[in-house]
Image: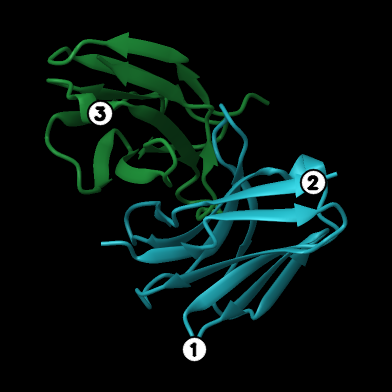
Chain colours: A green, B cyan
C-alpha cells in the first residue's frame, strides 16, 4: 500500500517564476492538505482540498493556489515566487468520512529553493 | 498568532532516560491533539494522539498526558533510544463539519539521545 507521494523531491527556481508541486494521497484517502515548513519551524497550513474544492485556507496570499483531480491527487501552484517561499512543502492526506478522519499522513515533501 | 506553544526547543537525554516535551494551547475548540516525529529529509510521521476527554494515552514507550483545565499536554518517551533522535512536533486540530481536520503545529523540539 503506497503512502503519500510527492514530486519533485527538490526544485530550484528563480524569484518571480512560477512552480507546480504534485501530490498523490494514500490509497483510500480523499482529502489533501498542503503545508509549508520553513527551516527550523513547524509546518504551516496552506489549504485543503476535498471533492475537488478548496475547503479550508490558511493565512497565505492568493499567489498560492491549488487543484484536486477526480483521482484525489492534488497540485500546489505558487506564482511570482519570493525568496521567502523557500521551504519544504508537505502534502498530507486523510479520509474525511472515515472513523479516523482526524489522522493526517504526510508525504516526504518537496524542497523548494528560490534564488 | 501562535496557538500552540511547545517547549523546550531542544532536549538532550541519555540512553535509557525519559524525554519530556510540553505543549500549551489557547483555543478551547481544539478537539484532537497528535504528536508527530520528523527525521531530517522526511515528512512528519504520526506518533500518537489523544482526545480531550482522556487524561492519558500510552502506546509502547510513548505516553501523552493531557490537562484540559490547564490547556496543556505533554509527550513522555520512556527508555529513550538513540533512534528516537528526531524533531518532535505537537499539534492541535479543529475538524470542520464539511471539511477535514486542520493541523496547527507547535514550533518543534529537537531531541538528541546520547548512547
> Marks 3 and 2, Cα distance to the nearest angstrom?
35 Å
Pinpoint the chain carrying mark 1: B
Mark 3 touches mark 1? (CB < 8 Å): no
Q: Is residue A30 above or below residue B35?
A: above
Q: Is residue B35 above or below residue A92?
A: below
Pinpoint the chain carrying mark 2: B
Pinpoint the chain carrying mark 3: A
Q: Secondary structure at mark 3?
A: helix
B73, B81: nearer the viewer = B81
Residue, x 41% and y 70% (percent of image)?
Answer: B30
Q: What x and y, as percent, mark residue B76?
A: 71, 65
- Name the residue beneath numbered marker 2: B114
> Marks 3 and 1, Cα distance to the nearest angstrom?
38 Å
- Name the residue beneath numbered marker 3: A85
In this rendering, does residue A66 appear at all? no
| Label 3 crowd (10 A; few <14 / some 14-19 / many >=20) | some
Mark 1 touches mark 2? (CB < 8 Å): no
> Marks 1 and 2, Cα distance to the nearest angstrom?
35 Å
Residue, x 41% and y 45% (percent of image)?
Answer: A41
- Name the residue beneath numbered marker 1: B69
Amino acid at each position: 500500500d503506497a503512502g503519500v507521494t510527492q514530486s519533485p523531491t527538490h526544485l530550484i527556481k528563480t524569484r518571480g517564476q512560477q512552480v507546480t508541486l504534485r501530490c498523490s494521497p494514500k490509497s483510500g484517502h480523499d482529502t489533501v492538505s498542503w503545508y509549508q515548513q520553513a527551516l527550523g519551524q513547524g509546518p504551516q497550513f496552506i489549504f485543503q482540498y476535498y471533492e475537488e474544492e478548496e475547503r479550508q485556507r490558511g493565512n497565505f496570499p492568493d499567489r498560492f493556489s491549488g487543484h484536486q483531480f477526480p483521482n484525489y491527487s492534488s497540485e500546489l501552484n505558487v506564482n511570482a515566487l519570493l525568496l521567502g517561499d523557500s521551504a519544504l512543502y508537505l502534502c498530507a492526506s486523510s479520509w474525511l468520512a472515515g472513523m479516523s478522519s482526524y489522522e493526517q499522513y504526510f508525504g516526504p515533501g518537496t524542497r523548494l529553493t528560490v534564488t | 498568532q501562535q496557538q500552540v506553544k511547545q517547549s523546550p526547543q531542544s532536549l538532550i537525554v541519555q540512553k535509557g532516560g525519559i524525554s519530556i516535551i510540553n505543549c500549551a494551547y489557547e483555543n478551547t475548540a481544539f478537539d484532537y491533539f497528535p504528536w508527530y516525529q520528523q527525521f531530517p529529509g522526511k515528512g512528519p510521521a504520526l506518533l500518537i494522539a489523544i482526545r480531550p476527554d482522556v487524561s492519558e494515552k500510552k502506546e509502547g514507550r510513548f505516553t501523552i498526558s493531557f490537562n484540559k483545565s490547564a490547556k496543556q499536554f505533554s509527550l513522555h518517551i520512556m527508555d529513550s533510544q538513540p533512534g528516537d533522535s528526531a524533531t518532535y512536533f505537537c499539534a492541535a486540530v479543529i475538524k470542520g463539519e464539511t471539511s477535514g481536520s486542520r493541523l496547527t503545529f507547535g514550533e518543534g523540539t529537537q531531541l538528541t539521545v546520547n548512547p
